[in-house]
Image: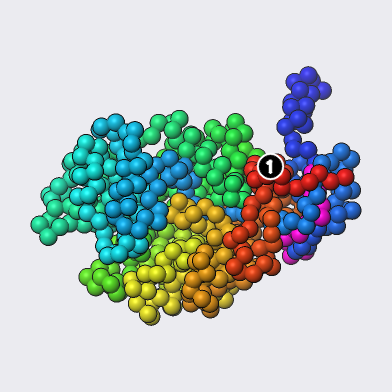
Amino acid sequence: MSAAVILALLVAAAAAPPSLVLVNGRIYTVDNERPRVSAIAIRGGRVAFAGSDAEARVAGGRGARVLDLQGRTVVPGLIDAHAHLLSLGNFLRRANLTGARSYDEVVQRVVASAREVRPGEWIQGRGWDQNLWPDKQFPTHDALSRAFPANPVVLKRVDGHAVLANAKAMELSRIDARTRDPDGGRILRSPSGEPTGVFVDNAQDLVLRAVPPASREETRKAVLAAIAECNRWGLTAIDDAGEDPETIAIYEELARGGQFNLRDYVMLGDPGSPQAPALAKGPRGPLYGGHLWMRAIKLYADGALGSRGAALLEPYADDPGNSGLLLSTPEHIRAMAEMGLARGFQIAVHAIGDRGNRMVLDQFEAALRRTPRVDHRFRIEHAQVLSAQDIPRFAALGVVPSMQATHQTSDMGWAEARVGPQRILGAYAWRSLLDTGVVIPGGTDFPVEQVNPLLTFHAAVTRQDPSGSPAGGWYPTQRMTREEALQSMTIWAAWAGFQESAIGSLSRGKYADFVILDRDIMTVPDAEILGARVLATYIGGKSVHEAAAAVAPGR
């Protein structure tokens, strides 16, 4: 054996995580063979055994580190099946407008966050939601323009499907009354035709294209901050719903350097054409020790319900002249689906309104008829408002409804006003879909919603907001069981990204990704679920977050 080979083996041995044994716990494996055990043994970053304390100590081998869980709860590493990693990193360093109860409060928060900004510099923020304001009306730019006459300001709505720009930003973007609405977008206007400052869906690009791009180093720091935030809340993996090639290149650089403490199933943002150069490498992954997968393409069918851009079969109940926006043509969805079937890419399409969802299902069906493929796992992201006729089509076509439970609790105060009492019965319809035989991978869509996956779990099983409202839950027949909710955040989410052989359960041979909690979320009363605290997050048997002295050394 050469010296170089010996050196490589020594380096690999030094890098491999030591054996670890967890004992005396309440461990939910999400493995049907051993659904609950007291101990697991980990060797080489993977689960070697799950069962009794005594057996796990033997399986761990001599010299293994032993952690006494002291009765604490362990669940598999939690997976967010629809998230936006770079957007979270950017959100963490810009004006946070989430929960602002008035437009005045929005302006005040921006002013407070921009005290050191020099004249002429762009100011950005995210999180405003006019549905939380007393008049529930879209804002105009006037107050923002008065507060910042010399700085261009762009503020994204909470859902990312509308942006508010001040006068300076519109001036630099060369937007005025003569600017036309783009396909799939809408400029809100005053009675005289002047832009009010709000740009919906594809119209956002008219303003955002003028914003100076972040530097590579700024993007790198944003990504690292977002990963740390994920780990803090017990997330070990995400499905990253739409990133560009430049961002993916930064992910790869960090992963090669051992700095990417997350398992990221990256969806490439719509490349524009089935022949786009960005698709040339084909599906890839797992890469870098199971930290990156690149085999999915993210498309957009329509906008969002909160900004009335979701495409509906009939007009909005609270805006009778508006049926929403289609952001992509049916032909584009079908062409990309056919490309995916031919080349092995998974196609995931954002669709919120019943018209948007039907259009995607129709195009998937047409593509599958032309290019049949087993186990394609095409996805619809959000599947938020569905016609009763379309609910069974997910199972019939093998399409995965990727849904976010906290969208329901955030939207329930105004969603019925948007769609009326009949269509609301097909909205956030988890039980109706589950009863057809599909699985639902659960996520948050962060930073649209909070990162905390326990909010997802709580919403899924209660249909209530964190305060416990409404009593009994909002349309409670659509609730999930606790077992289903945990599966949606672990094994179902892993399956939705073709990762079920590597993550999603604490099964022998899989990566040892897990979370230690201070209470048992599977048994505590509903009102106590959100009191649970993440004590530690492990990826591949290595701690990536410790809240405090989570566990005691065993003997």
In this picture, residue 253 sits left or right of residue 146 = right
Residue drawn at x 75%, y 20% is 4
Give the camera-side residue of 39 and 263: 39
Q: Position of residue 309 (x, y in %)?
A: 31, 62
Task: Describe the element under mark 1 as helix, strand or loop.
Answer: strand
Report if residue 168 lies within the magenta region: no
Residue drawn at x 45%, y 30% is 217
Residue positioned most to the top: 3
Q: Is residue 376 visible?
A: no
The quadrant of the picture occupied by the N terminus is top right
Note whether 252 is above or below 492 in the view shown.
above
Note whether 82 is above or below 417 in the view shown.
above
Report if residue 29 lies within the magenta region: yes
Q: Position of residue 303 (x, y in %)?
A: 34, 59
In this picture, residue 141 sits left or right of residue 78 = left
The quadrant of the picture occupied by the C terminus is top right
Q: Is residue 97 visible?
A: yes
Q: Give the quadrant of residue 410.
A: bottom left
Q: Give the quadrant of residue 38.
A: bottom right
Q: Position of residue 289 (x, y in %)?
A: 65, 40
In this picture, residue 467 sits left or right of residue 333 = right
Pointer 1 residue: 543
Residue drawn at x 59%, y 46% is 232
- Please name the colour scheme applied to the rendered image: rainbow
Number of other residues with Cα within 10 Å of mark 1, as a class: few under 14, some 14 to 19, many 20 or more: some
Residue drawn at x 25%, y 68% is 322
Q: Which segment is the magenta one?
A: 20-33
Give the camera-side residue of 489 and 332: 489
* Amino acid marked by disc 1: Ser
Give the camera-side residue of 463 and 114: 114
